[in-house]
Structures are given as structure tokens and as C-alpha cells.
Amino acid sequence: MVIDTQNIENILSDAVQPDVSLVDDILAKADAANGLSLEHAAALLSVEEPVFLQRIFKKAGEVKEKVFGKRIVLFAPLYLSNECVNNCLYCGFRKDNRDAVRKTLTIDEIIKEAKTLEGMGFKRILLVSGEDPKASGVDYLVDAVKAVYKNTGIRIVHLNAPPMEVEDFRRLKDSGVGVYQAFQETYHRPTYKTMHPSGQKKDYDYRLCVMDRAIEAGFEDVGIGALLGLYDYRYDALATIAHSQHLYERFGSHAHTISVPRLRPADGSPVSHAPFPVSDMEFKKIVAVYRLAVPCAGVVVSTRESAALRDKVIQIGASQISAGSKTEPGGYTLNKFQNSNFKFQNDRKAGWAAPTDNKPVEQFSTNDHRGLEEMIGAIAQNGFLPSLCTTCYRVGRVGADFTGMTLSGNMEKFCQANALLTLQEYVLDYAKNGVRELGAEVIAKGVEEIKETALKKEVLKKLQEIRQGKRDVYF
Ligand code: SAM
Ligand code: SF4
């Protein structure tokens, strides 16, 4: 069994608002950066007292720093296709969104998009696709991944795509995908059923077991998440933690990433307001509890959230964020695609008029529009270290090794050092204006903070190599 939903319900119904001594006890346990029991995670998720919440946030920030250092990893999504056979009530790509302009990028267009992201300084991208076996089946996804590696300087490609069979996962793994990501959306069966009325995605269990299949196929790093706002956040957050614990018990590695998507308005979606709204304070609590319950996971906060909130969550446990995201296929280079092969869902002979701007439908509207450079500046100004690192996936620090190294406190020094090296590359190759100077200051300070003398010496040597023109230097 992946998760025991009855157990989740029992734990939540037994959980009471913890008093100060229980909160302090739990936080003392969390300090060891070894995770939390479901009971303790449920207790923290029940906290509403602002003073206690501040203590939870503080501890989550400390645990994040212990595990990954000050670095915040940056990436960009690249939407491949908005054609979809499913009907998720909350999503702009849903099949019954008749007004949507549909688009599946050609391989050349994918390369163009990836090159545009590379031109901004990204090294890590997340390919994202709707579910349509004809438009974006596994052959297409494999070709897309291979084309990006072959034709661009993008160093790691992750994938958020529909669940599939083990054999298809093997092919994707062989093409070089780093992390395979899919969200359960909600772990609450009745809500899942309502939200996913048709298409393959209506099968709750097929989706729930997807990570077991992906790992069996060789994916050592997988990313999970619940779409906040569909059901009681305490239930979905606790079930997400239980899901990660299941993967750890079965395969020896926790979820590599836990994403924290919160419902956003989407054109053509009948769910315009979250049935179970999650406030900003609750959102921060969820981020912090994920960090404390699964310290080794990358906690990912996307541009669904506002700039102010994203600047805050990096202080309380989030470790990865996207920047400058576009959620429609072709979003980064769209004007170059005008008048190309956009497909319209309805039969034009039936008299339906296409939207005049021919813009493919976006999945949802984003909320933080800062590009990579601005994001790097903001992270640095908040006292953190922007990182474009892609090393672990490429040197085999993955799966159980990654979980083990992280939980034993041995990852932080790699993260810190590689963040400095990738920031140095960025400063030399892409940064302009104030970010160039700010980046240089952050690098100097980061080097000073390295405690091991031998490592500091090695970092200084590698920084010098980068200044002399060497690229893709890492530990
Ligand atoms: N089609 C695939 C699937 O459903 O798994 C993968 C990509 S889907 C485009 C990526 C994720 O976006 C979904 O898993 C869902 O959590 C999220 N999403 C969909 N509609 C959203 C909305 N209106 N607001 C915020 N996130 C949304
Ligand atoms: Fe399709 Fe994914 Fe959107 Fe559902 S969430 S309609 S499966 S793209």
C-alpha cells in the first residue's frame, strides 16, 4: 500500500492544537534533520498560534540550512504541449476547454525555447506536458529530451508528464531525464474522483503507484506534490509526507522533490475558486512542515506564488524555485510561432471563431513575473545563495545515495561550493548591471563562510579556472 488513507484520517482526527511544550519537543526532534513521524507532522500542521508558527518557521529555516546550506536552486519550466485528453476541472489544458488554442511544439520549436532559456542563463529545465498519447506520447517526449541535450547547453532536463508504464519510463530514463515528477493533486479519493471526471487520470490508483513504477524502471529521483486548495490541506500535506515515507521504506530514498503547487485561476476551468482555500500563512506552514518532516527533499515553490511570498518561503524551508515561467507552449519565443501550426479545438467549419491573438492557452496564470536575473538579485539580497547547479544527477549522487548523504549532513558542503561555482559562471556570462557586482560580493562572502580549509582552497582554485574561461566546473 502506498499510503493508508484511513491512518491519515485517524492521525488527523487525533491531532490536537499542540501546546508550547509539545511544539518545543517536536522542534527539538526536528533539529536533528532526520524527519518527523506522521503524528508529529500532523501536530505541526494543526498549529494556528502565530507565536508557535514563528518557531516552526525558524526551525525549518535552520534545518534547510543544515541540509543544503544557503543555496536556492533555480530552474525554468518548458511547456511542450497543452493538448490533453483529461478533464481535470481546475486546469486550462482540460479537454473540454473548447475555447483553448492548442499547440504541441515541434522539435525545432522545443530547441528554440530551450536555447532561449539557456540564453537567460538557465542550466536546468523542467519539461511539462498535457496528456495526449497522439500529440505528446513517450516517443515525442524521448525525442524532446534528446534534442535539448544535443542542441543546447542545458545541463539537466527534468520532466513533469503523465503517469505511464514501466517500459516507457525505462525509455525516458535512458534518454537522460533527471527527475520524473507528477503530482497526485489530492490524496483524498472522493475529491480526486470529482476533480478528474474522465480520461486516464480519473484512475486514482494508477496515479498513486506512478512513482513505484518510475523507480522500478530506474528513476532514482522522483518528485511528488499535492495541488493545494482542492481538499483540506492538512490531509493532503500529511498524505504527501506519507507518500515520501513509503518511497523511503520501499526503495531507501525519499521523494527527491516535494512541490507545493497552490491552485491558481485558469481560463476555461470550472473551478475558479479553490474549494478549500489555503491562506498564505497556511502555505508557509506547509512549506515549513515539509522541510521538517522530509529534510532531504527539495521543497519547490513555483511562480504560482507572489514575489513577496516566494521571498519569504526561501527563509523557511523552500530550496528550489522557478523563475520567469511561462505556462503555455512556446511562451518564451511565442511571437516567432505566430501563424505556425496552432490547432483549434473546435471544427472551424462549425463557425467557431478562434481567439484573435492565436496564443496557446496557458495552464494557469502565474503570480511572480521576475526573470532569472531579477530572481538571482532578490535571492542574494535576502542573504541566500542563488544556484544553477545540476551536478548530483550527472555524477550519480541520486536516489538512496542522495537521501543518505543529505540526512547525514554531507550534502551541504557540495551544495554551497557548487552554488558558488555556478553563480560565478552566471556573473561572467549573463549578469548585467547591479547583479554582476552583487553576485561578486555574494561569491566572496560565500567563500569566506566555507569552514574546511582544504575545500575553501579547492573552491578558490575552481573559481579561478572559471574566470580563466573553463566552464561546467563542479564538485
Ligand atoms: N498533465 C500532466 C499531469 O497532469 O500530471 C503533467 C503536467 S500538469 C501540466 C502539471 C501540474 O500543474 C498538475 O499536476 C497540477 O498540479 C498543476 N495545475 C494544473 N492546473 C493548475 C491550476 N489551475 N493552478 C495551479 N496548478 C495547476
Ligand atoms: Fe491535462 Fe495535466 Fe491539465 Fe489534467 S492537469 S487537464 S492531465 S494537463
Image (cartoon, helix red, strand yellow):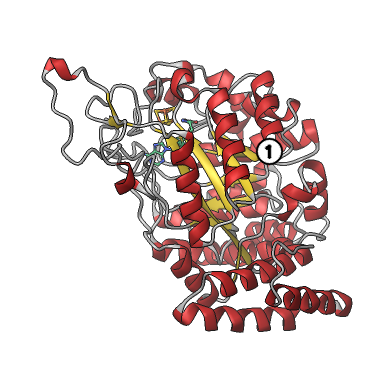
Q: Is residue 202 above or below residue 339?
A: above
* 384 and 349: which is toward the camera: 349
**294 to 90, vertically: above or below:** below
Q: Residue furthest right?
A: 454
Taking the image as shown, residue 1 lies to the left or right of residue 110, namely right
Q: Position of residue 191 (x, y in %)?
A: 43, 26
Q: Quadrant of residue 38?
A: top right
Q: Position of residue 71 (x, y in %)?
A: 64, 66
Identify the residue at the far left of this view. 351
Query: In the displayed structure, would residue 2 be above or below residue 244?
Result: above
Q: Is residue 48 above or below residue 89?
A: below
Can residue 47 be spotted in the picture?
no
Q: Position of residue 162 (x, y in %)?
A: 53, 27
Quadrant of the rendering where the N terminus is positioned: top right
- The residue drawn where x is 74% and y is 52% is 392
Tell me residue 19's x, y (percent): 59, 58
Quarter of the picture containing the C terminus is: bottom right
Q: Which residue is mark 1?
A: 176
Q: Residues within 10 Å of mark 1 (few under 14, many from 20)?
A: some
Does residue 256 appear to the left or right of 100 in the view shown?
right
Quarter of the rendered image showing ligand 2: top left
